[in-house]
Amino acid sequence: MRAYLAILGKDVRQELRTKEMITAMAVFALLVMLIFNFALGIGHTDKNTLAAAVLWVAFTFAGTLGLNRSMSQERAGESLRGLLLCPVDRSVIFLAKATANLIFMLAVELVAIPVAIILFNLKLVPSMVWLPLVLFLGSLGFATVGTVFATMATGTRARDWLLPLLLLPIEIPVIIGAVQATATILTGEPPTNAGMGFNLLVACDVIYLAVCYVLFEYAVEV
Amino acid sequence: MPNNDNTGSKRFLPAMIVVGFFGIMSAICMVFAYAPQERVMGIVQKIFYFHVSSAWIAFLAFFLVLVGSVAYLWTRNAKWDRFAHSSDEVGVVFTTIVLLTGPLWGKPVWGGWWAWDPRLTTTLILWLIAVAYLLIRAFVDDRDQAARYCAVLGIIGALDLPIIHYSVEWWRSIHPSPIVLKKGGGGLTPEMLKTLFVSMGAFTILFVVLVTVRMNLQAMREKAHDLRRLIGQRRST
């Protein structure tokens, strides 16, 4: 019993001194609420929107896991430093890492979509030929900012759990756009009918890619 | 940008503190004695003056984070990093005030604590990004590294805010939510407007004072840190 209390006391005292874990957990909880709110919408939600929301929330969290892994691999054994010593431009490293992350996300999505079709009893509609395009655009928005932020997050003491706190607020427009475009496809219409949703995705992708292309250099500098 | 050399701000800072003190005092007096009571909302509406002023500071602070971040990456002058860091920290305080006074006002007037209004939502996300900025500071020990990381987040965050605002606006138009009464924006009397401008001015001075103090503190902290390391090195040799 004394040992139990001693260890408990130590843990509580440690957390009270830094308050790091509690802060991070609280912010994370708030972010998850926000993400679900934007994915699901307020009030009445039909089956297609629900499926699209669940899919994109799943991709968001799966993507965060993958991005962390891809960069912590580079940090381990100083292989990132080795990469930086190569006589190539930093932006080439960024494009290659971002493309790799994009490919992995798309691979997961291609597996997840058929599963979702079965689990949610989704109707197979001809407009689904548009799905790969929307998946690509949505994942691109994640891969660009995600690659930069994962490089930074894995360089901190927090290692792998800082990434969602940095990435999720930034990605809210992408999630909104991707969910709306996907929901429109599932109801049997082309994603361009999703109003601004599709344009929002394209605009985010262009801006994120341009900004991250320039800023990656500062995130990797040793 | 504010002159943050300890010597330069010696006269500037006390003057600003005095001006700020009288500014805030006169803002409070004007809010309660000069500005007329709003007919429909009553006394609750008085929160409006400080709420809007805080919101103005919140967005000004984050804009200055963008300016400081770009300038830091460009010049690598630590002063700009201190400027961005201090703006962010003070900005978090004012954003928190906005997010607390908003629901206090919204509950009696809108009938709900919160509405997914683009302005509210963007402010909440702004707060989250600004807190993430401070988390990076907490988790990176190397000063230059922390400065670079924060600058990258500051730039991406600030550029993303207009997109977030726009996307929430659009998102809300397709998801009708509980009816939100329009804020009494159109029906401000000249007295109310004057009071608002005085409190916005007073808050801006307060912001400048806080950021200057915070920057000086940061500069001293960095100096103390360097000295401590120097002593450590001497001892070990």
Image (tube, coloured by chain):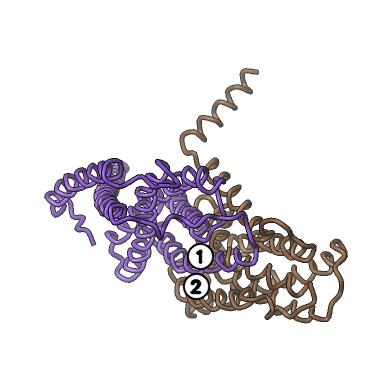
Chain colours: A brown, B purple
Q: Residue at x 42, y 66 (%)?
A: B155
At horizontal 53% and vertical 49% (from top left) the residue drawn is B110
Q: In percent of the image, x 62 and y 54: which residue is there?
A: B178
> Residue shown at 58%/45% (left/top)?
A25
Chain letter of disc 2? A
- The x, y position of residue A220, in whole percent, is 47, 67
Q: Is residue B223 visible?
A: no
Q: Position of residue A204 (x, y in %)?
A: 55, 74
Tell me which corner region of the image, top left, top right, bottom left or bottom right, holds residue B32: top left
Residue under pointer 2: A212
Which residue is more in the foreground, A165 or B166?
A: B166
Amino acid residing under circle 2? Cys
Query: Label 2's element?
Result: helix
Residue type, mark 1 in image: His
How far from the left and from the top, in percent, is residue B49?
A: 35, 49
Name the residue that disc number 1 marks.
B165
Q: Residues within 10 Å of mark 2 (few under 14, many from 20)?
A: many
